[in-house]
Image: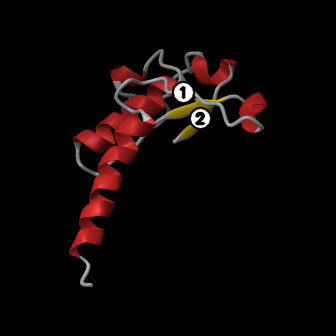
Amino acid sequence: MLLEDCDRSRSPVKVIEPHFRVFSEFRAASYRERYAILIEKLLRDRLYDGACLLQSSAASAVTGDYMEPHAELTFPKFVTPLLGHVGAMCAKRPS
């Protein structure tokens, strides 16, 4: 997931609960923190095989610079198992 790096994505988000209660881990959390929590839950529950969380500012659109705000949701940790899986599938292909 790519999230814009800006003040709004790094600031706590107001909680409004008109229909259901918000999980405690989302209270006083920024969008960046909420996305990290969501992605971790999806991976832990094996709903996703892999994922990463990247953040980049609008000014970095030209250079492609980005940051990885969560140590467990980095691009290398996402792509390494994916490449291994692709390699294994290619090795199984009949000649």
Judged from the image, the secondary structure of the residue bearing numbered disc 1 is helix
Q: Residue furthest bottom?
A: 95
Q: How is the image coloured?
A: secondary structure
- Identify which residue is drawn at 35% across, 54% down: 83
Judged from the image, the secondary structure of the residue bearing numbered disc 2 is strand
**Residue 36 appears at what percent x and percent y?**
42, 30
Residue 43 vs 82, above or below: the answer is above
Residue 90 vs 93, above or below: the answer is above
- Identify which residue is drawn at 75% across, 32% down: 58
Residue 48 appears anywhere in the view = no
Residue annotated with mark 1: 31
Q: Amino acid at mark 1?
A: Tyr
Instruction: Please state if 3 lies on the left or on the right of 53 as rendered.
Output: right
**Residue 90 appears at what percent x and percent y?**
30, 70
- The mark that comes first in sequence, 2 or 1, is 2
Q: Residue furthest front?
A: 95
Instruction: Please state if 13 lies on the left or on the right of 44 as rendered.
Output: right
Cα–Cα span, label 2 and label 1 = 9 Å
